[in-house]
Amino acid sequence: MEAYKKWVRRNKDYVHSLESLANGLTWLLPERFSASEIGPEAVTAILGIITAINEHIIDTTSTQTSAGPVEPNSFPYSLCTSAIKDLETLVEVAAQHYYGDDKKWNFIAVTEATKVLVRLALFRNSGYKMLLHGGETPNTEKHSDFSSSQHNGGDFRGHGAHRGSNEQNSWNLEGRALSALSRFGENARMGSDPVWLRGVQHQQAIMEPPPQMIERPSLSMILSEKGVQGALFLMGEVLFITRPLIYVLLIRKYGIRSWIPWFLSLAVDAIGAGFSTQIVKSRDYHLTASEQDELKRRKLLWALYLMRDPFFSKYTRQRLQSTEKLLEPVPVIGLLTAKIVELVVGAQTRYTYMSGS
């Protein structure tokens, strides 16, 4: 595995080219949207997981080589989220094939519940930062408001920062001297005085400062420092994370043809977007560039409501069919339009393709 990691990090561009080619060829697999789609979807899921693993290996290169604060928990939440998203379509296809259209929603609900738990854990572990691309992209940018509050004493360390840096420098000098003395004793195998050697090692452990740990904002810290804006941000993120699960549970109860899941899911997204709008307008809560792009991406996901039943069956499908008939006499454009409509209609039959989760 270590050899594979080194190869991936040395050939990043080559790996990306192979992944793009392989993912593109999956659309040419036979029976893509037929009843026996398990095989092609399994190939797609395996390629997606391999791609996620390679991206995780490449992304963790900089964190391993750079010296800095130590993270208290390094569980790969982003990799776990990507793997679940790659497997969810395979789970849907297999459940529909073996259990039917109605019971497949039980398996989809379990998949969505798993994603909710992983994302909530990531949301908490990241210090309640906004999830980028549903948690697949780590949010590593620092907020200027939290960083400034920590420099001004908000991190509960007081005003002894300069004194701590001077003491740390003296600790490093004495620690290196004691470390060299300890290594000299070990190389000489000075077994005649083990008490002295243990004393040197004990002084070295005392003089060397422990590695600095990353201090993440807690829930109480956000609510106390940000007040209403912090509460709105937390509620908006929780609504965004749990919205797909709420939608699936409503489909299990009312059916895919009912307007109730469609409207309630839209209402949850609208409420979450309203909270985000209030945060953007506020001067007390500053969003990073990545978080602002994430809010724009979430607004674009609203277009998927046009592809979800019952709206698709009543309105969108008719528009697509009328456009296909209009462009059918055109030699090349008509053929391309027919193929695009076929792919869109086929993709619409899969919940995971249009879920936006």
Image (spheres, rainbow, N blue to C red):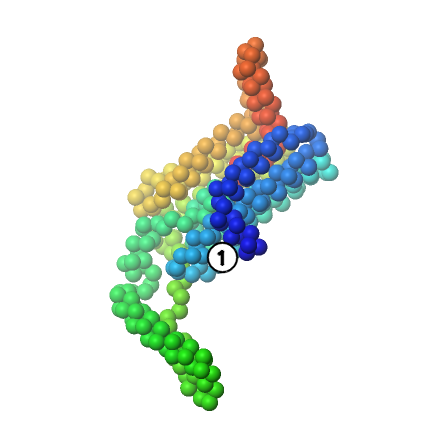
Q: Amino acid at mark 1?
A: Ser
| Residue 314 shows up from this direction | no
Judging by the rendered image, the residue that carries numbered circle 1 is 74
Out of 34 and 131, give the one closest to the viewer: 34
Residue 35: x %, y % from top left: 70, 31
Classify residue 161 by image quadrant.
Answer: bottom left
Out of 33 and 198, give the one closest to the viewer: 198
Q: Residue farthest to the bottom?
A: 192
Out of 243 and 197, give the one closest to the viewer: 197
Q: Which quarter of the rendered picture does the N terminus lie within?
A: bottom right
Name the residue rendered at 34%, 46% in the picture: 285
| Residue 210 shows up from this direction | yes
Residue 341: x %, y % from top left: 58, 22
Residue 184: x %, y % from top left: 41, 79
Name the residue rendered at 29%, 66% in the picture: 165
Q: Residues within 10 Å of mark 1 (few under 14, many from 20)?
A: few
Name the residue rendered at 58%, 45% in the picture: 50
Is 169 placed above or below 357 here? below
Disc 1 secondary structure class: loop
Is 141 placed above or below 167 here? above
